[in-house]
Image (cartoon, grey):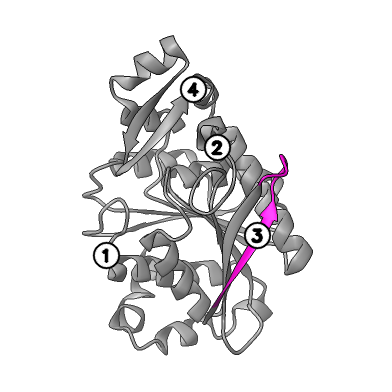
């Protein structure tokens, strides 16, 4: 595979940094858009390893930094769920203009919420994948602890989230409390794959059950076994990527997905060679 640095402007003319992971020897069978977890970045381990796995399986993967995070410009304190969705749509437009419209949308944790809500506005997408995603956007407020009261009374405060210290403004809370993901799930109109670990210490697997219950078919669930919330173990992220590659190929045009399973099996990693297809066969 090969990885290229790219960038694009969002709706507010803020430049967002991105990485495009591509197969090394042929045109991608389809393009994937990846949204990282809350306060994370495109260079986070899960994003990098899943992107690499999908690229080796023949997909083109665009992973980008949301406004104010990673290498992207802008102030994180000015962002919220709505701005994240706008950033997703700007990334979609970039792919449409310069490569091909994304057919697969992937979101990790809070990024999964953004993808579920943006999917309706991406007609090219045929499938959505959530990884360790909460069933209610308000779950993110639990990270704010005692700081939430100060944010609401004083207008902003610094909070510690997954090892990152960031400033949150009241407008973030006001935006997230009115978001309705259940309605988005009922009207998704696309295939849905939910990946979650039973031992997730940040977002309980009960959230995956709620997502699955409110979604309509076609929907699938695959457990990530002993993985942690951030998929910090490379093998867990590679496994997730291999599952996504096999599952997503089912929903692509025949000319796009032929040979997908063979390419995954050809990988040297035993994760790809022995584990990638079995869980999908059980849950589809």
Q: Which residue is mark 1?
A: 233
Query: Is label 4 in contact with label 3 (beta carbons under 8 Å)?
Result: no
Q: Residue at x 64, y 71 (%)?
A: 30
* Position in image of residue 149 (x %, y %): 35, 14
In whole angstroms, how far apart are the C-alphas of marks 4 and 3? 31 Å
| Nearer-the-camera pick, 275 or 232 | 232
- Between disc 4 and disc 3, whose residue precedes? 3
- Between disc 1 and disc 3, whose residue precedes? 3
On screen, residue 134 versus residue 216, left or right, reads: left
Mark 1 or 3, which is nearer the eye?
3
**Magenta region: which residues?**
3-14
Q: Secondary structure at mark 1?
A: loop
Q: Residue at x 40, y 86 (%)?
A: 265
Residue 154 is inside the magenta segment: no
Q: Quadrant of residue 48?
A: bottom left
Q: Residue at x 21, y 59 (%)?
A: 226
In whole angstroms, how far apart are the C-alphas of marks 1 and 3? 28 Å
Q: Which residue is mark 3?
A: 7
Q: Which residue is mark 4?
A: 177
Q: Which residue is mark 2?
A: 75
- Label 2 CA crowd tier, 10 Å (few <14, some 14–19, many 20+): few
Mark 1 or 4, which is nearer the eye?
1
In whole angstroms, how far apart are the C-alphas of marks 1 and 4? 32 Å
In whole angstroms, how far apart are the C-alphas of marks 1 and 2? 30 Å
Mark 1 or 2, which is nearer the eye?
2
* Position in image of residue 267 (x %, y %): 40, 86
In whole angstroms, how far apart are the C-alphas of marks 2 and 4? 21 Å
């Amino acid at each position: 595979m090969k990885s290229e640095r790219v960038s694009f402007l969002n709706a507010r003319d803020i430049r967002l940094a991105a990485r495009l992971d591509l197969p090394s020897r042929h045109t991608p069978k389809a393009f994937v858009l990846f949204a990282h977890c809350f306060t994370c970045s495109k260079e986070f381990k899960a994003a990098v390893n899943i992107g690499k796995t999908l690229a080796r399986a023949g997909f083109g993967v665009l992973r980008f930094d949301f406004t104010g995070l990673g290498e992207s410009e802008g102030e994180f304190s000015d962002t919220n769920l709505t701005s994240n969705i706008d950033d997703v749509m700007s990334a979609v437009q970039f792919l449409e203009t310069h490569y091909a419209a994304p057919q697969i949308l992937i979101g990790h944790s809070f990024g999964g919420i953004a993808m579920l809500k943006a999917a309706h506005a991406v007609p090219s997408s045929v499938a959505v994948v959530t990884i360790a995603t909460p069933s209610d956007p308000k779950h993110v407020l639990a990270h704010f602890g005692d700081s939430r009261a100060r944010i609401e009374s004083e207008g902003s405060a610094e909070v510690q989230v997954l090892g990152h210290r960031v400033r949150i403004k009241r407008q973030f809370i006001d935006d997230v409390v009115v978001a309705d993901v259940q309605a988005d799930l009922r009207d998704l109109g696309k295939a849905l794959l939910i990946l979650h670990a039973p031992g997730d210490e940040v977002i309980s697997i009960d959230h995956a059950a709620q997502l699955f219950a409110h979604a309509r078919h076609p929907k699938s669930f695959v457990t990530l076994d002993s993985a942690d919330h951030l998929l910090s173990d490379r093998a867990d992220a590679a496994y997730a990527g291999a599952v996504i590659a096999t599952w997503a190929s089912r929903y692509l045009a025949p000319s796009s997905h032929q040979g997908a399973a063979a390419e995954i099996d050809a990988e040297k990693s035993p994760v790809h060679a022995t584990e990638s297809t079995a869980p999908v066969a059980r849950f589809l």
